[in-house]
Image (cartoon, rainbow, N blue to C red):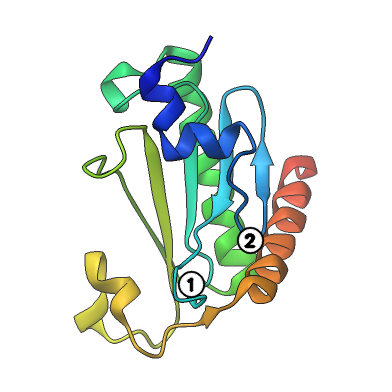
Amino acid sequence: MVNAKERDCFICRKHRGEIQLPGGAIYEDELLYVGHISSDSNEAYLGYTMIDIKRHVSGLAELQDDESAAVGRMLTRVSRALKACIGAEHIYSFVLGDHVPHLHIHLIPRYPNTPASYWGFGISGWPEAPRGDAAQIEEVCSRIRRCMAQDEVSP
């Protein structure tokens, strides 16, 4: 049974398949969903991914121990893939939760030659950042999936 908060929640709707985003699920299991962001302008910052908790919780403090451990492992796996597969030199991660009250973690790659004035929260404002449409997002997601699969079997 879906309650009113979950029925209207963007992230819950995505998990139920009501909303489709370019690239689809990069990774998904019973606890987590990893996907690429999209943009209303059809030009998304390439490599900007989100880790969503499947269960509808508003913040980190509400995580169960298994969810918390899964988030930590996934942060590392996705970060490694972003560095290895798309050439990121640094990965930013943050949780806001102000606009969508369903826990999701932002992971944003910083590419080589990004001016320091755009580092941190201003990273997606860099005008020369790699941006792409749905087809380019699909391609980036495929590369990230392959890297994550290789990382899974590495010693």
Which secondary structure, mark 2?
Answer: loop
Relative height, residue 41 to residue 30 (above, below): below
| Image quadrant assignment for residue 153 | top right
Q: Residue at x 77, y 48 (%)?
A: 149
**Circle on res. 22:** 2
**Distance Cα–Cα, label 2 vs label 1:** 10 Å
Q: Residue at x 66, y 49 (%)?
A: 26
Relative height, residue 136 to residue 92 (above, below): below
Q: Residue at x 41, y 31 (%)?
A: 8
Which secondary structure, mark 1?
Answer: strand
Relative height, residue 88 to residue 145 (above, below): below
Q: Residue 107: horizontal and vertical position, in percent?
A: 43, 54
| Image quadrant assignment for residue 128 | bottom left
Q: Residue at x 58, y 34 (%)?
A: 15
Are the two marked residues, 2 and 1, in contact with CB atoms closer than 8 angstroms? yes
Q: Amino acid at mark 2?
A: Pro
Q: Amino acid at mark 1?
A: Ala
Mark 2 or mark 1: whose residue is earlier in sequence: 2
Mark 1 lies on residue: 44
Callout 2 environment at 10 Å: few (<14), some (14 to 19), or many (20+)? some
Callout 1 environment at 10 Å: few (<14), some (14 to 19), or many (20+)? many
Horizontal side of 68 relative to 22 (left or right) equals left
